[in-house]
Image (cartoon, helix red, strand yellow):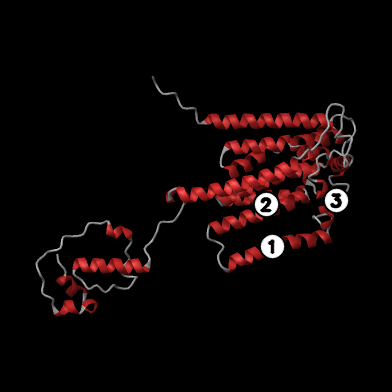
């Protein structure tokens, strides 16, 4: 019986693409159904976006100072429909697109497509993500931009080519333009990743490592100080009060957009479960990396080839000197460069005929090269 034919190489890629397209479509339909329950804007900031979009379309600038990226993305949709519908379409579409960067980050951290699909499913079906689409649209779009910037950063750290570095910088700029929450979370996630990558490549040692640790520890303090001075642009201490109800079991707050005729959006213990899964996932990845370092060969792990230490060089030169009849005194390290491969090479046969030491041979390293060669066994 013949062996089964292997699957085409393109099949996994196509399968992942179909799965992501399905997740985005289903997520968009669900978000749009909730936003379209009313012909009026919904959410606590519902009227903020139509006003901003109308000003952007009529004057080319925003009515109120704000992070502009989300509104720039909504503007074409508002131009095709109207400011209210355009705001709802933008919130549903760019909120559903979170599946794509979530897959990229999950697949890169989990090192497989399955981990990326799990991350995409969690992002699109999350009640928190749907809540941001309804109540805080810029935050929801900022989450999509944040994960995109994080994915670009991970690609740049894996292979720091000029193109990937430029894309990572562009992603960071877009995160700042999207929302201050996205900018703050990018700093929280990116700084440890950059430090770990630099340390793994041997770029951070000694004082550099100490300076980097001090900088990382002082960066949150600096951000909080700037947030206190500019609370409308950066996170401040007052916003930490919003996290008090983060782990509540029922946080729908009886808001009209969250309690509809067909469904009620509640969080359950989603935040708590997500935090636990994040800690467990980080521990599993750390343990897997440690196991790979122990079990994988150096050609896969990337360990540099081992070189002979100065002591080994001296011993090797002594052994070779004994075999060839030369002086056992090792020459300087810049003359005798011997590695472990020297011991695997075949030595020339040594004659058993006794030789009479000459005056030149007793001088050892003080003789000229021609005299030393005459004493050696051919």
Q: Quadrant of residue 110?
A: top right
Callout 2–callout 3 Cβ contact below 8 Å: no
The x and y percentages for residue 340 are 32, 59
Residue that mark 3 sits on: 65
Separation of disc 1 and disc 2 at Cα? 14 Å
- The crowding category of the residue bearing disc 3, from other C-alpha atoms within 10 Å (few below 14, some 14 to 19, many at least 20), is few
> At x 74% / y 52%, what residue is drawn?
183
Does label 2 or label 3 sit earlier along the sequence? Answer: 3
Residue 125 or residue 185, whichever sits in front:
125
Position of residue 324 measured from the top left corner of the image (x, y, whole percent): 19, 67
Q: Is residue 375 left or right of residue 72?
A: left
Q: Single out the residue that lies furthest toward the left.
A: 353
Query: Residue at label 1?
Result: 217
Mark 1 vs mark 3: give the one in front.
1
Circle 2 packing at 10 Å, graded few (<14), some (14-19), many (20+), is: few
Examine the rendering and report whether any part of residue 365 can be seen.
Answer: yes
Question: In the rendered image, is residue 97 in sight?
Answer: no
Q: Which mark is residue 359?
A: none
Task: For label 1, count other residues whose C-alpha is less than 10 Å away and answer few (under 14), some (14-19) or many (20+).
Answer: few
């Amino acid at each position: 019986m013949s062996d089964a034919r292997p699957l085409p190489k393109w099949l996994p890629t196509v399968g992942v693409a179909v799965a992501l397209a399905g997740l985005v479509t289903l997520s968009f339909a669900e978000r749009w159904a909730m936003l379209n329950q009313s012909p009026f804007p919904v959410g606590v900031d519902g009227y903020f976006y139509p006003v901003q979009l109308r000003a952007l379309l009529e004057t080319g600038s925003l009515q109120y100072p704000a992070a502009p990226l989300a509104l720039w993305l909504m503007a074409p949709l508002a131009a095709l429909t109207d400011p209210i519908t355009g705001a709802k379409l933008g919130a549903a579409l760019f909120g559903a697109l979170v599946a794509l960067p979530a897959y990229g980050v999950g697949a890169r951290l989990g090192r497989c497509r399955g981990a990326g699909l799990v991350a995409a499913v969690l992002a699109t079906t999350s009640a928190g993500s749907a809540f941001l689409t309804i109540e805080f649209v810029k935050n929801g779009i900022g989450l999509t931009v944040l994960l995109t910037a994080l994915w670009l950063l991970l690609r740049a750290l894996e292979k720091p080519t000029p193109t990937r570095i430029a894309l990572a910088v562009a992603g960071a700029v877009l995160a700042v333009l999207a929302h201050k929450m996205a900018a703050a979370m990018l700093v929280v996630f990116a700084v440890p990743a950059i430090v770990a990558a630099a340390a793994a490549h041997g770029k951070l040692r000694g004082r550099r490592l100490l300076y980097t640790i001090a900088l990382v520890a002082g960066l949150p303090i600096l951000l909080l100080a700037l947030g206190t001075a500019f609370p409308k642009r950066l996170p401040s201490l007052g916003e930490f009060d919003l996290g008090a109800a983060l782990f509540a079991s029922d946080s729908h707050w009886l808001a009209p957009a969250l309690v509809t005729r067909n469904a009620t959006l509640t969080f359950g213990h989603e935040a708590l479960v997500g935090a636990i899964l994040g800690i467990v996932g980080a521990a599993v990845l750390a343990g897997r990396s440690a196991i790979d370092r122990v079990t994988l060969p150096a050609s896969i792990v990337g360990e540099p080839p081992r070189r002979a230490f100065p002591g080994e060089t001296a011993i090797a030169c002594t052994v070779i000197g004994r075999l060839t009849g030369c002086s056992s005194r090792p020459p300087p390290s810049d003359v005798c460069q011997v590695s472990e491969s020297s011991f695997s090479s075949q030595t020339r046969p040594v004659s058993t005929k006794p030789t009479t030491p000459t005056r030149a041979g007793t001088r050892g390293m003080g003789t000229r090269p021609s005299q030393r060669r005459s004493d050696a066994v051919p």
